[in-house]
Amino acid sequence: MLRFLARRLLIIPLILLGLSIVTFTVSRLVPGDPVKLAAGPQARPEQIIKLTEEFGLDRPLPEQYFMYMTGLLQGNWGYSISTKREVGPDLVTYFAATLELTIVSTLIGLAVGIPLAVVSARWRDRWPDHFSRFISIGAVSVPVFWIAIVLQIVLAQNLRLLPVSGRFDPRMSYPETYTGLLLLDTLIGGNIPAFLTTLRYLIIPALCQSLLVIALVTRQLRGDLLDIVRKDFVLVARANGIPERVIWTRYLMKNALIATVSMMGFLIGFQLGGAVLIEYVLDWPGIGQYALKAALQLDFQPIMGSTLFIGCVVVLVNLITDLLYRVIDPRIGLS
Amino acid sequence: MTTLSSPPLSRWSRWKADHASQITDLRRGIYRFSRNRLSVIGLTLVILLLIIAITAPLWVPYPGDVTGSINMAERLKPPSAEHLFGTDDAGRDVFSRTIMATRTSFQVGVIILVVAITIGVTLGAIAGYFGGWVNQVIMRLTDIMLTFPGIFLALAISAALGRGVLNAMLALSITWWPGYCRLVEAQMLKMREEDFVAGARAIGASNTRIIFRHILPNLLTAIIIKASMDFGFAVLNLAALGFIGVGVLPPEPDWGSMISAGRRFIPGSWWYSTFPGLFMFVTVLAFNLLGDGLRDLLDPNSTVRS
């Protein structure tokens, strides 16, 4: 266990180093001058030169990279030219919003996906199977930014059931922050109206985001269930007269869910970065939206910061899933 | 060479005899594919969409609207017999533009996949065939790329590079190759131990020849099937870039930028955003249904129950 952990922990810095080099190269080799964009069209040439020097953008690229990484190792995520704010604290705030969205959409995805998969596998090649396969393929085919707009039109603008966009009602006083996850914060503060408001703002983004989870969970679990139902121990259980219902709930699920659990890690990591479109459309103040705004402004340090931040989180999530996978399934060695 | 003693066969029947096992495989494959109604629907839709993409310029009702023509008298008209999907804020026919966008999307989608497959397959083949530190370097790089949500990186890259379809293609190709690299590397590791590779090496075939002539043809089916599943997503991601405003440049029609432009006229002119999105959904769905059926064919575990 320890050796496995040590080896995995050794690779992580290498992966992050690679990611930082890739992002740095891509974000610095672009045409266009971020300083000119930030200083505005009226800026005088000497102002631009001064700003360029201030941000160290006149130095050679390797030196800039080295400077950035040295700062990062000291916990300094840099400074945003466009927002005129420190990147580090902003990343944490925005990331919390994305994390909250991801957790809720993952829960919705599991709640819908697992039953769909079971129904699909149990009645294979009959109409429940066709139905649930169609749902799962359909869910992954929907353009998220489009379905977000459609839900906005129908649920928010026509039926007036839910707010159109954003994370919290601007007319209400913003709840006190403990964890950054608003649902949790409002519960801790005992502020039930604020909790309900938060929930209402979450529904449309979480529904859109959960489509991918539903699709992938259904596909994975259905396949695994179909594999396992052919195994000998199921035959024995049936021969012993154990009711089909018990076989499906107790015997099969325990074995079939293993791969789904390991996929959840990938899915959560993917959602943290992949939420960018939903965040953009529904004005959800998440890390994807933050990065996208920075990229459109050619604001280099927030792009680097958010990319590396997401990279760190994804790598960590993958490590945890790997460990979890080995804990719940002792048949897999730790090599 | 001496002549054969058996009666002369026509070229066709000789070819049939030589490829008997492949033909049986193909027949069985077609049978199994046709048993899955959803994939047959997918295939039909894909063929229909391809025909639409190829022939669209011949029959689109308002070809002038596809480029920059402006007709303020017809501005934001709801769907009707003349304008099936209504008109947009410049009085252009949304139906014509949606249909013509199929062409652009398909062209760009094919280019993205071709570039990504070329990079991915080459790197994967090198990594898998040579192993050792070459494998380590390439596969760790692939891991980095796979770890990272592609759309996030693609958006950042194309936002930084500036708008335009070329930059969008570049950004998507850069983020798309790792999947193929992983696929080919895994198969390559297995294949290089096979007897036929050892045989080819024994008669003095070069590494390049072994990789490209002996091993890669065996992986062709898997690559094609992955590509058919990926195509829908490539089109989807291109539209996502267009939606953000960093993809296809207006007035060139593009689903993403149409949906984005239509947002300003919601809820009054709902058709402007809705129909391009719906059409796009059907397109992506068709490719995914097809891909799903094809994957079942390859999966040795799936059997047809009669």
Image: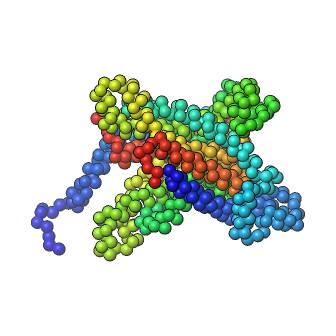
Viewer-proximal residue among B148 and A190: A190
B2 or B56, nearer to the observer: B2
Please state which of residues A147 and A226 is positioned toward the viewer in this rendering: A226
Picture residue at 57% right of the left edge, 55% below the top: A9
Res A331 → quadrant: top left
- State the residue at coordinates (43%, 47%): A332
The answer to whether residue B283 of the structure is visible from this angle is: no
Q: Is residue A94 above or below residue B210?
A: above
Residue A83 position in % (x across, y down) = 80, 51
Q: Is residue B211 above or below residue A162?
A: below
Vertical arrangement, residue B7 with respect to residue A149, above or below: below
Q: Camera-side residue: A107 or A129?
A: A107
Tell me what residue is drawn at x 59 percent, y 60 percent: A14
Total count of labels: 0
Left or right placement of residue B160 versus residue B143 in this view: right
Q: Looking at the rendering, which quadrant does residue A277 occupy?
A: top right
Given the current orientation, which residue lies at the most extreme left position? Answer: B5
> Which x, y percent locates residue B139?
50, 61
Q: Is residue A261 shown left or right of residue A285? A: left
Q: Residue at the spot x=75%, y=56% of the render? A: A76
Question: Which residue is farthest bottom?
Answer: B204
Q: What colouring method underlies this structural image?
A: rainbow
Above or below, comparing residue A46 to residue A105 in the picture:
below
Q: Position of residue B42 (x, y in %)?
A: 44, 41
Provide residue B178's location: percent of width, then percent of height.
Answer: 52, 57
